[in-house]
């Protein structure tokens, strides 16, 4: 059954695909800017602790349920439920998850479109086409619609090729390229004047700030968004892993790659901000707060690149190319969620499913662009701040309370016969049952009333 519906061919392929989903605009820009505005090293410290002790267990819940069911989230949650009431709640959770994944893609495609536009603008500069370069970096409806559309076409193209030919093949190619580019950029930025000040901010923690509740909540949210939790992405990727795979190990590898890239991105962006500051670019407001994330990436970094002269054009191209790649390996994982559901539930052909859902999402992005002021921030808040934590909570409840513990153990034993004697089995079931739900609910309530 598993191979008929597509399966990753190797551990490397799966880890690249899942890490590709996890690593996105959230890690490479969101994490470093949040770190910069939340005490630098203090945020880094808390993020590391929470990613390993909380996001990793929640990721495991999705991977194990997905691999057991070899199905999309709706059918998977139904399958592990003992009665019809829980089956209905499970199905509703899965359906809300795929709607939220689609909505995330509808704003993600807009931001990713800007990345492509900024990347092409560097090329235009290289060719001396300064008018075109300026148009590409100026906020405007035609540009926004065009590049959102281009990004969705790329996403559709990869997803319509299926799991092995599409998701795995492209993630395995793009992810190593992304890591290599990131290392080169970090090495380059660290040679510039001002970078050491950034490094100090990033590496010397202020322990008083590390314990502030706002910092902890922000770091938690960042970890959950960063690991693509709650919307069924990791569940559906888990459903494509073969039965011999040791799940706690591959889940751990994905978490490590995700964290590594976020931390590396911090080594790029935070020193780069201080290089820009050194070069006279405004980064902080008069009250000492960081200028908003959008403004930072689309104003401060290009200004930084300009100060580097000719090399800046190359660095700018590389950076925005990197952002576009990271966004693409995440967006394919978002589109796969609704696509897998309609293929498996309604028997649609993959191509038909991909084109119709991709088209609908492009339409939704268009509506957001036409009502940018009122809708853009709203959709981001609704999906990432409210829906993801609440859905993550539901997955933990299903893994910890609804699903029979023996079945869960059997599923884990398939790829790791000795799992009962591991630290993972001694800790994780309790974690996912008690600690994860309580803390996720805490995030949710904080974002509602905080
Ligand atoms: N993890 C992705 C990022 O960091 C975002 C994402 C969220 C991807 C939900 C899939 C599902 O950018």
Image: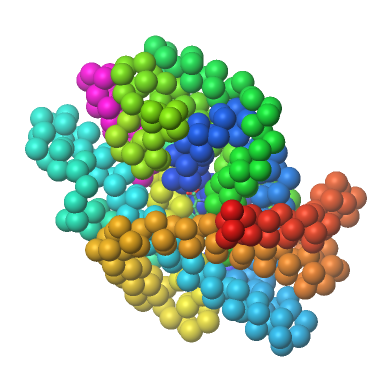
**Which span is picked out in magenta?**
301-324
State the residue at coordinates (83%, 57%): 430
Nearer the observer, 325 or 223: 223
- Residue 67: % across, % down: 67, 64
State the residue at coordinates (71%, 54%): 439
The answer to whether residue 380 of the structure is visible from this angle is yes
- Residue 271: % across, % down: 45, 22
- Residue 309: % across, % down: 23, 18
State the residue at coordinates (62%, 64%): 390
Q: Image quarter for residue 279?
A: top left
Q: Main secondary structure of the magenta part?
A: helix
- Give the vertical position of 82 relative to 150 (above or below): below
Residue at the extreme bottom of the image, as rendered: 84
Specify whether 357 is left or right of 391. left
- Give the vertical position of 296 relative to 396 (above or below): above
Report the quarter where the N terminus lies.
bottom right
- Residue 31: % across, % down: 51, 39
Q: Image quarter for residue 232?
A: bottom right
Residue at the extreme front of the image, as rendered: 287
- Give the vertical position of 417 relative to 260 (above or below): below
Residue 434 shown in magenta:
no
Nearer the observer, 433 or 286: 286
Specify whether 11 is left or right of 156. right
Specify whether 410 is left or right of 141. right
Q: How is the structure coloured here?
A: rainbow
State the residue at coordinates (19%, 56%): 141
């Amino acid at each position: 059954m598993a191979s008929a519906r597509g399966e990753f061919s190797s551990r490397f392929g799966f880890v690249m695909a899942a890490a590709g989903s996890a690593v996105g605009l959230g890690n490479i820009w969101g994490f470093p800017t949040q770190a910069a505005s939340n005490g630098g090293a203090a945020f880094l410290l808390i993020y590391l602790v929470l990613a390993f002790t909380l996001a990793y267990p929640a990721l495991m819940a999705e991977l194990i349920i997905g691999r057991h069911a070899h199905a999309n989230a709706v059918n998977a949650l139904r399958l592990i439920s003992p009665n019809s009431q829980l089956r209905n709640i499970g199905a509703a959770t899965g359906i809300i998850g795929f709607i939220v994944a689609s909505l995330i893609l509808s704003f993600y495609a807009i931001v990713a479109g800007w990345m492509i536009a900024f990347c092409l603008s560097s090329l235009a500069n290289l060719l001396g086409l300064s008018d075109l370069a300026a148009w590409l970096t100026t906020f405007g409806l035609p540009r926004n619609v065009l590049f959102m559309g281009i990004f969705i076409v790329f996403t559709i193209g990869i997803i319509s090729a299926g799991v092995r030919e599409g998701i795995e093949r492209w993630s395995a190619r793009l992810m190593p390229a992304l890591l290599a580019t990131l290392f080169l950029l970090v090495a380059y930025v660290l040679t510039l004047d001002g970078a050491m000040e950034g490094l100090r901010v990033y590496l010397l923690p202020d322990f008083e700030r590390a314990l502030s509740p706002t910092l902890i909540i922000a770091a938690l949210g960042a970890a959950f968004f960063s690991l693509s939790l709650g919307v069924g992405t990791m569940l559906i990727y888990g459903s494509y892993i073969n039965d011999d795979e040791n799940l706690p190990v591959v889940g751990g590898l994905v978490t490590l790659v995700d964290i590594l890239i976020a931390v590396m991105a911090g080594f790029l962006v935070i020193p780069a901000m201080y290089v820009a500051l050194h070069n006279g670019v405004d980064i902080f407001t008069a009250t000492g707060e960081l200028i908003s994330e959008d403004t930072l990436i689309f104003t401060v970094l290009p200004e930084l690149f300009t100060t580097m002269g000719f090399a800046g054009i190359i660095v700018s191209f590389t950076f925005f190319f990197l952002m576009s790649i990271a966004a693409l390996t995440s967006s394919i994982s978002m589109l796969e969620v609704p696509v897998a559901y309609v293929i498996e539930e309604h028997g649609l052909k993959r191509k038909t499913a991909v084109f119709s859902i991709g088209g609908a999402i492009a339409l939704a992005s268009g509506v957001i662009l036409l009502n940018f002021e009122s809708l853009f921030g709203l959709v981001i808040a609704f999906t990432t701040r409210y829906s993801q934590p609440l859905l993550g909570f539901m997955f933990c409840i299903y893994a910890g309370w609804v699903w029979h513990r023996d079945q869960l153990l059997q599923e884990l034993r398939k790829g790791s016969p000795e799992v009962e004697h591991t630290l993972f089995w001694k800790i994780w079931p309790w974690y996912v049952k008690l600690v994860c739900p309580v803390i996720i609910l805490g995030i949710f309530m904080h974002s509602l009333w905080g």
